[in-house]
Every structure is written in C-alpha cells, then in structure tokens.
Image (tube, rainbow, N blue to C red):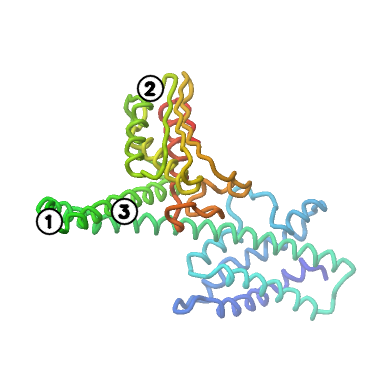
Amino acid sequence: MRLADFIEQHAREIVAGAVSFAETQAPAGMPLSARELRNHLPLILDAIVRDLRTEQSASEQHAKSEGRAPASVGPETAASHHGRTRARSGFGVNQMVAEYRALRAAVLRLWADDRALLAGSIQDLMRFNEAIDQAIAESLAEYSAEVDSWREVFLGALGHELRGPLAALMINAELLARTAHDSSHARQLDVIRDSGKRMTSLLDDLLDYSRSKLGAGMVLRLEDCDLTKVLAEEVELLRAALPEASIRFDAKGPTTARLDASRLREALHNLVTNAVKYGDAGKDIVIRASGTADELLVQVASPGPALSEGARRVIFDPLRRGAERASQGEHASLGPGLFLVREIARRTAAASMRRLRMA
C-alpha cells in the first residue's frame, strides 16, 4: 500500500495519537479541549496526502525538505494556521515542533506495523519527510510572526502605561526644583529632572518603534525649514551633553525643504550618540549636511573599527545590538535608535517628495 493511501485510511487513528501527545505538551494551567488540540491536524494530513500524490522535480523536493517551497497563493496553509493558533494558545516553539515529531512517528510506526510496504516505499518515505519538514517551516514562520506581533503590542502598552507615573514624577520634580533651587538638594533634583527627561525620550522612542512595527506609521509634522539651521542647533546641544566628544559640523548646498525639524534632530542625536559609543574615544566626529534639488544628505562619520558584514545586515534591526562592545556609555540597550533613524529618513522622503539619506 502506498503511503498516501495508508494515511487516508488511518487518518483518524493518526490524529488521535497526535492529540494524545499534544495533551502532554499543553501549557501548564491552560487546559485545552481535544477539539482545540486537534484543530488543523486533519487538514495538515490532507495537505501531506495531496503533496505525496503530486508530481515534483528533484529540485522541488529538495527545496521542500529544507522548508523552502514556494509560498502558497490564496488562503493560508493549514500548517501556517496551526502555528499561529499554537502561539495564541501559549505553546512554546519546542512544544509545537514536538507535535510534528509525534505526528511523523505515528505515521511511520503504523505504516511499518502494517507490513504491506511496496517497492515505492522508500520514495514515499522521503516524500513524506519532505512534506513534514515543509509543514514545520510554515508553522514556525507563522508562529514567529504571531509572537513578534504580541511583543510589539506589549512594548506599546508598556510605553503608554509608564508615561502616566513618569509624568507625575516630572511635574513634582519641577515643583520641588522651583522652591529648592538654592537648597542643598538642588543638585539631586537636577539629576532627577534630567533622568526623567531621558526616560521620557526613551519611552517616545519605544512608542515610535512599536507604532512603526505594527503598521501605524510614524507621525511627521512638516514645515518649511532649513536643515542646516536645524542640525546646527542640535549640534550645539550635543556638544554640551557630550563634552568628551569632539564634534565638527559642515554644510553646503540648498538644504531648505518641508521637514519635521524635531524628528530630524532626534535622528541626528541617535546617530551621534551611537558614534560616541562605538567610535574611537577622543577622535573627531564629523557631521556633514548637503543638498541638491532632489536630495538631502546627512552624514555622521567617526574613526573606529569597520563594521563586519554580519553587523551591517542587522544594524538597523530593532531590539538587537551588534557583537562589537561599546567603547563607552551603556553596554545593554534595547537598541531602537538606528531603526528610528531609518524610519525618519523613509517617512521624510515619502512626505516631502525629496530624498533624504542619513548615514
């Protein structure tokens, strides 16, 4: 008996065994019904049967064994839906993959016990394993997407919840500072206010990151302004905030456009502080701004070790940091800064119809 026919005849028994195993994997304290545990397992088996009966080239089979089959057109696959529902049900990724191992083992064990294998059994076995591997890849992709989505929701909610108590802290710190500016505690109050402003800035970055990842986009407030003037003002603040850094600023060409001055200052701040952290201490950081009729360019250059190919691939990824350690400053950061620089450049270019590059 060919494997596709065998799976069809024994589908109920195979699914029952897979459900029994899934019961052992269900998250503690979150009992799931047999129906919830079964959900799309029969549909996954149906997809595998169709795959076994479909003519495929050697290259197509090889791609499937590595989970690289072409993405399906139209409704999502049963395996993709299974991955998302398992994520929503609280399954860990290892628990979900273990289900597939159990499904694979159940089919092969029953088939071997049937003692009715034909000459095509080895080919059937290879095709079945390739189909299972592709299903695992589809489930993992959707599982990861669902988990990432909830992470962004959590970060956004966390940012909003923290704004309230932080605002109360800042208001009271300002009130105390007005009445105690000559007292022995004036310095401590300044530290509290500066730290509160820094926390507010970090929360703003976190909320911008969360909105961008969830598709809400970044809000720009455009107005006619001179990029050179905007950046020069931020450079003066950076020099005051980073006295250990030597910062030079040069500008040339027409740099007037419809821009969000606050966002661009934020982007420059992130680029320069990143250069201070990872560049060679004591060396000049050079900021250049230039403009043409079609493009605005902002460059921040600092001496330091060249980025590796791996670091260049992930440097703009949020919530990740490169392997290189910072030469100074914080050594543990969520790292949304460069992600936000890229988003500001993209949104500005789209809104102002003038290309903006920041590097």
Q: Residue furthest front?
A: 282
Q: Is residue 74 left or right of residue 199?
A: right
Image point (44%, 49%), residue name = 336
Residue 67 spot, x, y in % from top left = 69, 57
Question: Residue 213 vs residue 231: left or right?
Answer: right
Query: Which amino acid type corresponds to the residue marked 3 in the rendered image?
Result: Met
Residue under the point 56% across and 55% down: 323
Residue position for label 1: 183
- Using the image as rendered, state which of residue 129 and residue 210 is in the foreground: 210
| Mark 2 to mark 3 CA distance (whole Å) | 32 Å
Q: Dot 1: few (<14), some (14–19), or many (≥20) neighbours within 10 Å?
A: few
Identity of the amino acid at label 1? Ser
Q: Earlier in the sequence, mark 2 or mark 1?
A: 1
Residue 82: % across, % down: 57, 63
Q: CA distance from mark 2 to mark 1?
A: 46 Å
Q: Which residue is mark 3?
A: 199
| Nearer mark to the viewer, of 1 and 3 | 1
Q: Is residue 244 left or right of residue 1?
A: left
* Quarter holding residue 12: bottom right
Q: Residue at x 42, y 53 (%)?
A: 329
Instruction: Please provide percent x and percent y for residue 63.
Output: 74, 53
Observer-nearest of 212 and 178: 178
Q: Residue furthest left?
A: 179
Q: Which residue is mark 2?
A: 256
Q: Residue at x 51, y 53 (%)?
A: 321
Badge 3: few (under 14), some or many (20 or more) residues near its Cα, within 10 Å? some
Q: Secondary structure at mark 2?
A: strand
> Looking at the image, is mark 2 or mark 3 earlier in the sequence?
3
Q: Disc 1 and disc 3: Cα gap in Å?
A: 25 Å
User: Number of numbered discs present?
Assistant: 3
Mark 1 / mark 3, whichever is N-terminal: 1
